[in-house]
Image (spheres, rainbow, N blue to C red):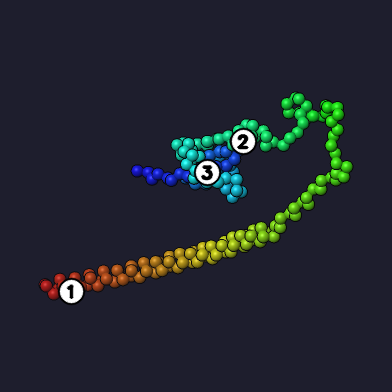
Amino acid sequence: MPRKQKLKVYRTPIGFHDAYVAAPSQKAALEAWGSEHDLFARGVAERIDDAALTREPLEKPGVVIRRLRGTTAEQIAALPARKHSGRPGKAAQPSEVEEGQARKVKPDARPVSRPKPKPRPDRAALDRAEQALAAAKARHERELDALRRREAELARERRQTEQAQDRERARLERALQKTREAYERAMRLWRG
């Protein structure tokens, strides 16, 4: 009978929803969400134990359950305020701003300075690791070559030993045969 795996419930935000899944491991949860990145290491996903939140995912293991995070009104209120032209998806143009509404621009507004670009990561450690691997591979190949040479030498020595033993055995068997025949002849003569 197959052993039942203990399921845990994990959660990660997806847009305006939270995605829940019951899975045996974090890896299985990431696969269910279709994520190629470790959301747990990034602090974006977590394991939860709240009985109210875990009930439905535990009833459907491996299935991603999406739940709306807050009401639609709460989500819209959380969006940054901006003026609209009345047409969906288009911000108000300067000509479309109602008269009497002056655009508020701070007189001492300075351009926003961009943060300095991050320095390029140092590749020295990667180069050292690659060199260490290449050196190990070369050493391993030399060691295997030495073993192959020793194996060939031992095989040659074994063949020579076996041939010498075969010759000696044949010589001794011939001597035994001659001695046996001489003994049997002597016994026949003795018996008369």
Tell me which label, 1 or 3, sits earlier in the chain.
Answer: 3
The circle drawn on residue 16 is 2
The image quarter containing residue 80 is top right
Tell me which label, 2 or 1, sits earlier in the chain.
Answer: 2
Residue under the image location 49 percent in, 64 percent down: 152
- Callout 3 amino acid: Tyr
Residue under the image location 60 percent in, 45 percent down: 44
Tag 1 near tag 3, CB within 8 Å: no
Residue on which disc 3 sits: 10
Left/right placement of residue 79 relative to residue 173 reads right
Screen quadrant of the N terminus = top left
Please provide percent x and percent y for residue 159.
Answer: 43, 65
Residue on which disc 1 sits: 186
Could you give the CA–CA distance between mark 2 and mark 3, rounded to whole angstroms? 17 Å
Tell me which label, 2 or 3, sits earlier in the chain.
Answer: 3
Judged from the image, the secondary structure of the residue bearing numbered disc 3 is strand
Tag 2 near tag 3, CB within 8 Å: no
- Callout 1 amino acid: Ala
The image quarter containing residue 74 is top right
Q: Residues within 10 Å of mark 1 (few under 14, many from 20)?
A: few
Q: Residue furthest top?
A: 87
Could you give the CA–CA distance between mark 1 and mark 3, rounded to whole angstroms? 99 Å
